[in-house]
Amino acid sequence: MTRPRVAVATCAQARGLDEDEPLLLDALARHGLLGEPVDWHDPGADWSSYELVVVRSTWDYHERPGDFVAWAEAVERVTRLVNPAHVLRWNTDKTYLRDLAAAGVPVVPTVFASPGDPVPVVAGPVVVKPAVSAGSRDTARHEDGASPEALAHLRRLLEAGRTIMVQPYMNAVDEAGETALVHIGGRSSHAMRKGALLTGGAGELVGGLFVEEEMSVREPSGLELAVGEAVLAALPLDASALAYARVDLLPGPGGEPLLLEVELTEPSLFLTYVPEAADRLAVHLHGLVARTASASPSS
């Protein structure tokens, strides 16, 4: 019997760098699916030939965000895509933090500015980043958001036509690190500790794609788990349609967990640290393929 084909969407730059990919491909095979890495840029890719397309290491999407969303919508017209295109459209611009803050989620305080707006001046240690970015690219910590270096960073991004965001640097992260809560198929799967990334300016990019992080498995607190569930409940979209989600939290001034970002597009799921999570994802994807097949008029 021919195994259903699943495209694992990636990009050429990520080849050999996505540690999750081999484990996911092996897990798909164990659960009766044929997983194939496919570059989302490939003009010759026949997306309709796959029963399912899973967005994974499309880590260069921020260079062409409009094209990326258009690609996702085109794929969705011919087959099933996870996470869905409307999720990617919302999640690839971090101004979504406004939506979640308005919904009552405890979010790291964030000032946004778009091209044409005055350059925001935020005193004290800050993190400056573009609203559309991935892998901590073009992101840096500044000891004073009012310093010439910080203002130059902001102007450079704004003059390039990019919306920017300024957040206070949470000093507690230096010792506690970030907590990444990974959900698979709508259920909590595992959590990771991410070491402080911006202890001194901007980190070096691996393969031009991402800043390498210091990782370890973490047992999240009950409060962190509650904030993670609150984030998913507050999403202005159908959370049940998510094959995966990663909620990244920082300790606030009083140690309270604050949302840094919710990753629904192409997050690392840290499968090498929790290999059984690859099977959880494969089982969920197998279920999507089976339900899609049973709903097909030709089935």
Image (tube, helix red, strand yellow):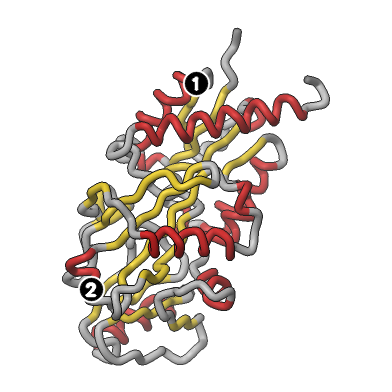
Left or right position of 181 against 200: right
Which residue is at a point 54% across and 46% down the rendered structure image? 186
Residue at image mark 2: 172
Q: Residue at x 69, y 30 (%)?
A: 291
Is residue 41 shown to the viewer in this render?
Answer: no
Position of 70 relative to 45 (above/below): below
- Quarter of the picture containing the N terminus is top right
Q: At which x and y percent is residue 22?
A: 35, 29
Left or right position of 140 against 42 = left
Q: Quadrant of the C terminus?
A: top right
Q: Position of residue 209 (x, y in %)?
A: 33, 52
The residue drawn where x is 33% and y is 33% is 275
Task: Inspect this view and state whether residue 214 appears.
Answer: yes
Residue positioned 41% across, 89% down in the render: 119
The answer to whether 32 is drawn above or below residue 234 in the figure is above
- Quick check: marks 1 and 2 in contact, CB under 8 Å? no
Camera-side residue of 297 and 274: 274
What mark, if any, has residue 31 been given in the picture?
Answer: 1
**Label ID, residue 149:** none
Q: Please provide percent x and percent y for residue 240.
A: 62, 48
**What's under tag 2, amino acid-wise?**
Ala
| Residue 148 image offset from top left, x and y in percent | 25, 89
Vertical side of 191 occupied by 234: above or below = below
Q: Label 1 is placed on what type of residue?
A: His
> Mark 1: few, some, or many residues within 10 Å (few <14, many ≥20)?
some
Is 269 rendered above or below residue 154? above
Q: CA distance from mark 1 to mark 2?
A: 42 Å
